[in-house]
Image: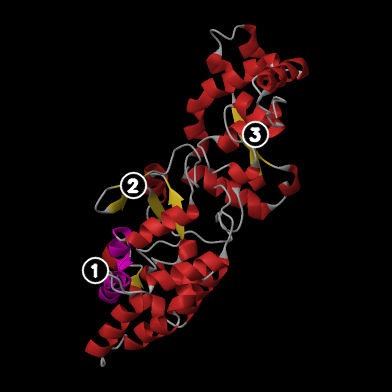
Amino acid sequence: MIHIKRDDSKASEYAKLIDTTKGKYVSISERLENWILKNPTNSNVGIVQDLKDRLHCILKGTPEELESLIKEYYKNGNQQKIYNNSLNNKGGLTEFGGVLLDLFNYKSFRKSAKAVWLSDSLNIKSCVTCNTQYTLKVNHIKNKRLLFHLDHFFPKSVYPYLSLSYYNLIPCCASCNMSKSNKVFQLNENIHPYLESFHDIAKFKLDEESLTEYLVDPNRNLDKLSYKVELRSSYLGSSLYEIKLENYLREFRICEQYEQFKDNVAEMCMKSRYYNIKRRKELRELFKESDIIISDELIGRFIVGNYHDEKDLLKRPLAKFMKDIGEDLGLI
């Protein structure tokens, strides 16, 4: 998980946009109100009214506020009317839960220009969860359609009333979306990208012995390279973050995913031997001869082959990984 900067003003703008009827898209409050008018004697009308009254808070609520609502609904019995843990021996939405899923109408949102606005507004180019793949979007001439996935931190199959909540929608790749699926996450056990970051908590660390073995014969010993993920020193001894990191690595198979990028590490190993202070100075002079002034940040990106400033880690896949290994090798 790479941190997404929280923007409450953008969340408020999103809430207003979502609750505005335009074209074929009907606002959520209008859908909820229509259901209430048609079902005044339904035993669950109070829940629908409560959701309508709190709609904007739900749409723009922080992760903590969303989890607080979930706990409230469990405590007052509302959640049990929406989701049955024993249904079909697996658990699933009740009939009323299915009604809420339809009323919040996530599918309609995904097909609307409002989803395009969200994508453009976030401007996130790589999977927030694994950072190994791009999140993609294509614009058709007549109808803009999105190819990127949005994972629900609090799954819509359990909490349909949070299916459109701004801080519950995490841009990701198809692989991570399928890995997460309908698993129920909690803030005290799982990393939420609007609250914290895998990058802040942990780092990729190159095994020095494997590096020595690789450098004996770089043409043949690529498989000798190995690296691991470890907590940063400031988080060592924290059982909370040990649990969060362990769950993250397991749920999204992070270590297994990154095994395929040894060639990137190998290239950085060779660059670390070549791009010493003298070579970097020559590089600056080379660009200077062409009237190009190149910054230290751009030189680092040129050598590493990726962004390495923390604010840019979502601009390109593998940025966090290459930053960590690059720092380990003294490239940045």
Q: Do tag 2 and tag 3 residues touch (Cβ < 8 Å)?
A: no
Q: Do tag 3 and tag 1 residues touch (Cβ < 8 Å)?
A: no
Range drawn in magenta = 92-111
- What kind of residue is marked 2? Leu
Q: Position of residue 315 (x, y in %)?
A: 53, 41
From the image, give the main secondary structure of the stretch colored magenta: helix
The residue indicated by pointer 1 is 24
Q: Which of labels 1 and 2 is toward the front? A: 1
Residue sitting nearer the eye, 53 or 231 = 53
Dot 1: what SS?
A: loop
The residue indicated by pointer 3 is 324
Can the viewer see residue 262?
yes
Name the N-terminal-most of marks 1 and 2: 1
Dot 2: what SS?
A: loop
Q: Residues within 10 Å of mark 2 (few under 14, many from 20)?
A: few
Badge number at residue 147: 2
Question: Can you tell which quarter of the image residue 101 is in?
Answer: bottom left
- What kind of residue is marked 3? Asp
Q: Mark 3 to mark 1: distance in Å?
A: 47 Å
